[in-house]
């Protein structure tokens, strides 16, 4: 059995309901047994949507925290592989089979970049730039204890930066070994979250991201640690990524550095 750690936004407030229902449906159709550990922070209408899945519900105090989402899953199932995920994805039915196989050899894994739900991405560059963020990470039971300790040492709250943090923790917990990207064997569909409609305008998301950065003091304790703020650096910590996407990540990282250098000269 594999443990899925997630949280949901409230149901009944807009188009995001369909996204979350599609995510739950994809979980119910997985060919591998799972147990869902759901951490909620006062959201409404969640439990009645989970009838098709084995789950444990943990009620916590707002604001919502992805650090607590992972910690609660680990505390409930300390001897299981854990997949942290957002609730706006659709998984292939065979994905968790692939995850269990690859976690025998690697300490952490994902599948990225995502497939656009509307199939509207017409180039690898567009695919990478559209999904500059990571929404799920599978972590082997060999290192979940260490990752959980890191997660709560620098708690993430509300929106932003968590994917950078949890990949860095998995990388450190695995003695600086790279994880594996399952994109070639099992791809994930990404659904568009209607942030404005559910009361999460862009300015609030940017503010939340900056506040999480202020709490993540670890990243300021060494010059090279700031590299973890670059999403390209995060994704280069995975083997198995198609070469075309690796080249794009390196290109985007290089252009970002070049722009900073040019701004200093001007």
Image (spheres, helix red, strand yellow):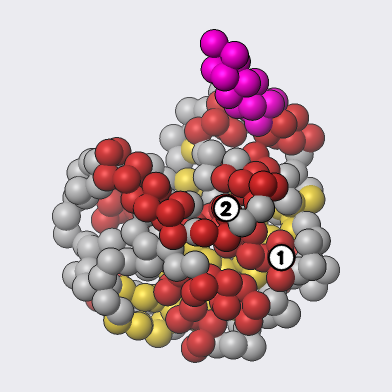
**Would you name the residue on which mark 1 appears?**
172
Residue 238 horizontal/vertical position (percent): 74, 51
Nearest to the observer: residue 118 or residue 12: 12
Say which element carries label 1.
helix
Residue 245 sits above or below residue 181 on the image? above
Q: CA distance from mark 1 to mark 2?
A: 16 Å
Left or right of 90 in this view: 46: left
Residue 160 among magenta residues: no
**Would you name the residue on which mark 2 appears?**
220
The magenta segment is 251-266
Nearest to the observer: residue 97 or residue 239: 239
Residue 252 among magenta residues: yes
Near mark 1 (Cα within 10 A), the count class, few <14, some 14-19 or many ≥20, is some
Q: How many marks?
A: 2
Residue furthest left in the image: 13
The disc placed on residue 54 is: none
């Amino acid at each position: 059995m594999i443990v899925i750690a997630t949280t949901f936004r409230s149901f009944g407030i807009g188009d995001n309901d369909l996204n979350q229902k599609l995510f739950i449906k994809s979980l119910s159709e997985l060919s591998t047994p799972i147990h869902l550990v759901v951490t909620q922070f006062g959201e409404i209408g969640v439990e009645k949507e989970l009838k098709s899945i084995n789950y444990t519900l943990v009620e916590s105090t707002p604001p919502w925290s992805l650090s607590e989402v992972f910690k609660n899953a680990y505390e409930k199932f300390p001897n299981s592989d854990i997949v942290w995920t957002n609730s706006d994805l659709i998984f292939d039915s065979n994905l968790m089979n692939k995850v269990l196989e690859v976690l025998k050899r690697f300490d952490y894994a994902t599948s990225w970049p995502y497939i656009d739900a509307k199939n509207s991405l017409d180039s690898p560059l567009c695919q990478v730039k559209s999904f500059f963020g990571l929404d799920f990470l599978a972590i082997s039971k060999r290192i979940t204890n260490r990752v959980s300790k890191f997660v709560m040492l620098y708690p993430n709250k509300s929106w932003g930066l968590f994917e950078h943090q949890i990949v860095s923790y998995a990388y450190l917990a695995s003695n600086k070994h790279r994880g594996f990207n399952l994109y070639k064997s099992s791809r994930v569909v990404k659904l568009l979250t209607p942030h404005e409609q559910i009361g999460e305008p862009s300015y609030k998301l940017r503010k939340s991201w900056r506040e999480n950065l202020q709490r993540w003091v670890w990243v300021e304790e060494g010059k090279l640690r700031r590299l973890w703020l670059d999403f390209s650096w995060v994704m280069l910590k995975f083997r198995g990524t198609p070469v075309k996407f690796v080249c794009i990540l390196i290109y985007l990282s290089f252009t970002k550095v070049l722009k900073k250098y040019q701004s200093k000269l001007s």
